[in-house]
Each structure stands twice: as C-alpha cells, then as structure tokens.
Image: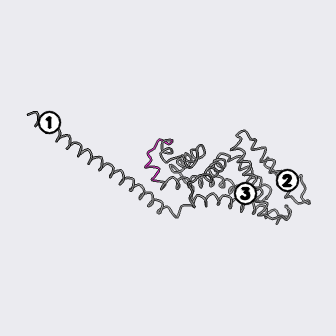
Amino acid sequence: MRAKLRLHCAARQDLTSYFEGEGELMSNRKSKDAARSVRVASAARKAALAPAAAERPKGREAEFLKAALNLFAESNFASVTIKDIAQSLGVNTALIYYYFENKTDLFRAAIDFALENAFANMRAIEGGSADPADLISAWLDNHVERYAEIHHFVKIALDYKGSSERDPAVDATIASFYAKERELLSRFIRLGIDQGRFKRVDPGRMAQFISTHLDGCMVRMVILPDFPLKAAVGDLHRFVLDHLESEAQPKTTRKTRR
C-alpha cells in the first residue's frame, strides 16, 4: 500500500512539473508574442506618422524624450537601458517600445528633440529681426538661455563618441546640428556683409570659428561646473563683433542683447 502511495505521489509530482513547465513555456511564448506585437505596432505607427516626422513631439513622447535626455546626460549611452528610462517615468517598458524601436532609436530621437528646442527659439527671433549683429548675438545668448538642452547634447555627444556602440543615424544627427549651426551663422554674416555692416570675411570660416568656440565654452562647463558660461560667451560676443564690424560702422550704434 505504501509503495502504491509513493508511486501515486511521484506520478502526481511528475504531472504537476509537466504542466508547470508547459505553463512557463506558454507564458514565455505569450511574452514574446506581446513584445513582437508592440514592435509591429510601433513600426506601423511610425509609418503612419511619417509625413509629420518633422513636427515636434508632444505629450507622452516628449515626456519620454526629456527623461531619456536627463539619464543619458547623467550617465552615458552604453550604461542607460530602456528599463532605466521606464523606471524613471514609472511606466512599463512596453510603453517605451510603443514609441521607439530600441534604445538607439530613442537616443537619436532624444538628440533630435534637444536640437529642435535649441533652434526653435532662434527661428522666432530671426523672423522678427533683420539686424545681423542682433541675430549673431541672439544665437550666442541662445546657448546661455537654453543651456540645459545644449549642455545635455554636448555631454551626450562626447560620451557617445567614446562609446563602442555606434549607429550611422545617430552620427548623422550629431553632424546635422553643426551643419545647421554653420549655415545659420554664415547666413547672418553674409547678411551683414551685404548691408555694409561687416567686413568682407569668409562667412563659412567665421561661422566655424564661432561654433568651435561656443563648443569650447560648453565643454568647459562639462569639465568645470562653476565655469562662468555667461561671461565667457559675452567675451566671445564682443570679440566676434569687434572683428566683423566695418571700420565705417560707428561702434556706438552697435546693438547688443547684453
């Protein structure tokens, strides 16, 4: 009788293990299917929104991008995970994957978001002023006023360039910022030359000089948090306009935002 009871118990244990194993297998399959469904939904959503890709993110997506920017800036690209970002927001990782295909996609979108914010204010200023000195001053001031976004971009770009995880789309996004900045500053300098306000300098080279020294100020802030950014950008502002302004241009008429 005892032998039969032991045999019965063993059989029940085997049967329980079998069904538990099957249940775990089914659960894993469901999890994989759910993740696959999220990725498909994300891809479909992005395809549907493709014509509006240039629009600034709103709502939850913008919230995710801000959180991602903060985490990538505080740590680095390699160490931050989707789970970290989801936890910082108090949401499930599946919701992040609804908006972004993977960490690299989120990283690229976060950089785009920061740069779009940096240029948005400048477009509004440019639309209301035709004074080339004021426009150059506005771009320099923009680096002080929108320090958080630009500082995050510089910090993230430096970390990313030193990382082994590289992606052509991210490299292109970083390069596009400098291309846009150079085009913007070149346009202002060319405008000043055409108006007779500025000397006949090479607009591209002068734009590159301004961009490079602005980067120097932002990188110094990464290294030395107490670096006087506003004063340093002010020095650059005065140096640039002193160099650009024509000898015939009275110094007393110079407009400055400082």
Mark 2 burial class by Cα count in 10 Å: few <14, some 14-19, many 20+: some
- Quadrant holding the N terminus: top left
**Residue 6 circle label:** 1
Query: How far apart are the alpha carbons under marks 2 and 1?
Result: 99 Å
Residue 29 spot, x, y in % from top left: 32, 52
Q: Is residue 157 left or right of residue 35?
A: right
Marks 2/3 in contact by CB < 8 Å: the verdict is: no
Q: Residue furthest left?
A: 1
Mark 1 burial class by Cα count in 10 Å: few <14, some 14-19, many 20+: few
Q: Residue furthest bottom?
A: 194
Find disc 3 in the rendering and name its residue: 128
The magenta stretch is: 88-98
Q: Nearer the viewer, mark 2 or mark 1?
A: 1
Local secondary structure at mark 1? helix
Magenta stretch, main secondary structure class? helix
Find disc 2 in the rendering and name its residue: 254
Which residue does the image show at 52% across and 64% down from the upper left? 51
Local secondary structure at mark 3? loop
Q: Is residue 116 left or right of residue 221?
A: left
Which residue does the image show at 60% across and 52% down from the upper left? 160
Q: Quadrant of the rendered structure where residue 129 is? A: bottom right
Q: Nearer the viewer, mark 2 or mark 3?
A: 2
Which numbered disc, 2 or 1, marks the residue that appears first in the sequence? 1
Marks 1/3 in contact by CB < 8 Å: the verdict is: no
Which amino acid type is shown beneath numbered disc 2?
Arg
Residue 68 spot, x, y in % from top left: 55, 47
